[in-house]
Image: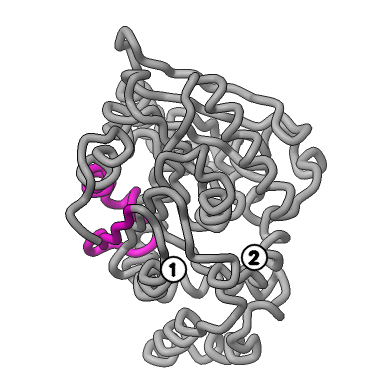
Amino acid sequence: MLATSAALLAAPAAGLLGHRALRRLQGARLLSIDTANGIDEQGFVRIGGLEQWISIRGENLANPVVLELHGGPGSSNSIFGTRTRAWEEHFTLVRWDMRGAGKTFARSGPEGQGEMTTARMYQDAVEVTRYVRERLGVDKVVLLGQSFGSVFGLRLAREYPQWYSAYVGTDQNIQDAGRDTSVYEGLRARLRAGGKRKRLAALERMGPDSRWWTAGQRAAFSKMLATSDPLTADTMKSVVMGSLWFSPLHTLRELGGFAKAMKFSEQILADVAAADDWADGTRFDLPFFIFQGDRDVITPAERARRFFDDVQAPVKEFALIGNTSHFACYRDPQWFLHLMLTRVRPVVTGARQPAGV
């Protein structure tokens, strides 16, 4: 009887793992690059005294290079490889797992991540940029900052315009030293409307100024944000977790490490909360683009637009990605590619200048 029960319980698990194995095999075939001038290079590079994972992929090395800075902190965009496969037909895509994230975290564990500060991670990004330019023999790359990565992206674009042919922000994170409380108030309204009294009380005890929150409060706030909005919750389940589960690049052991990496990396969020992008400057000496989810409750489009309106740049464009919340470029990767091809690529290749902002 016990043996029969165990077999019945094992059957669904075996079926689930079998389905995952099939999807991973299909994904691996999709990711195959066999063009004559293509590149598929993945491995660890010594960055900031730490072995950090970098992937360089594309079907034609003559295409513009895009250096992607992932979100989190502690997340990894390498899980989206199959969703963004078409990007690699038109761009050479560089993905880097920062310290405290993805395969970099898995390689040496929490004790081997070294200094976990925004200053150190920013210097890592500088080193990665240098490495990519030297490895691919290019003067400039397109800098793509996504969510948490866009915090570093703005600063890099300000300070090193000679290294980047354009800046593209998506899920653009705009810091203003706590002045804008619209995200907090939006969450508060959703919790009240949904009758979530305990969560509402916890939120109100925290107060709107994130500069004074503990690491635990930041984590609780992020969880409430993601679960209080149906579109965001669905994106986390179907796009983020679905991509992670079926990723041909990640083992079952690495799946568990994904959550651990994000938990470990929460420690640096206090540095970010005190930042002020307006005070740091709104002049950028390179083409400047923001492509934002129109229903993003984590990094609202309205806030990104206010910053964009103040930006001074030789070329700038703002576009919404329809019916998407956070992770907009991965929920609708085809439309994001369309924006990259029609707005960004012509500018960085000198094919044309946009008609307006």
Residue type highlighted by circle 2 = Val
Q: Is residue 17 visible?
A: no
Q: What percent of the width, then of the height, locates residue 227?
A: 44, 71
Kindly identify the residue that appears in the image at 40 percent across and 85 percent down: 190
Disc 1 secondary structure class: loop
Q: Nearer the viewer, residue 257 or 353?
A: 353
- Residue 90: give its label: none
Disc 2 secondary structure class: helix
Q: What percent of the width, then of the height, locates residue 253?
A: 60, 35
Q: Quadrant of residue 170?
A: bottom left
Q: Give the residues in magenta.
A: 315-339
Residue type highlighted by circle 1 = Thr
Is residue 333 placed above or below 44 in the rendered structure?
below
Q: What percent of the width, then of the height, locates residue 262?
A: 62, 53
Kindly identify the residue that appears in the image at 70 percent across and 32 percent down: 47
Say which quadrant the C terminus sits in.
bottom left
Q: What percent of the width, then of the height, locates residue 105?
A: 68, 39
In primary-sequence order, the first of circles 1 and 2 is 2
Q: Nearer the viewer, residue 297 or 119?
A: 119
Q: Are marks 1 and 2 in contact (CB under 8 Å)?
A: no
Q: Which residue is mark 1?
A: 299
Is residue 159 placed above or below 42 in the rendered structure?
below
Q: Residues within 10 Å of mark 2 (few under 14, many from 20)?
A: some
Q: Which residue is mark 2?
A: 272
Kindly identify the residue that appears in the image at 23 percent across and 64 percent down: 323
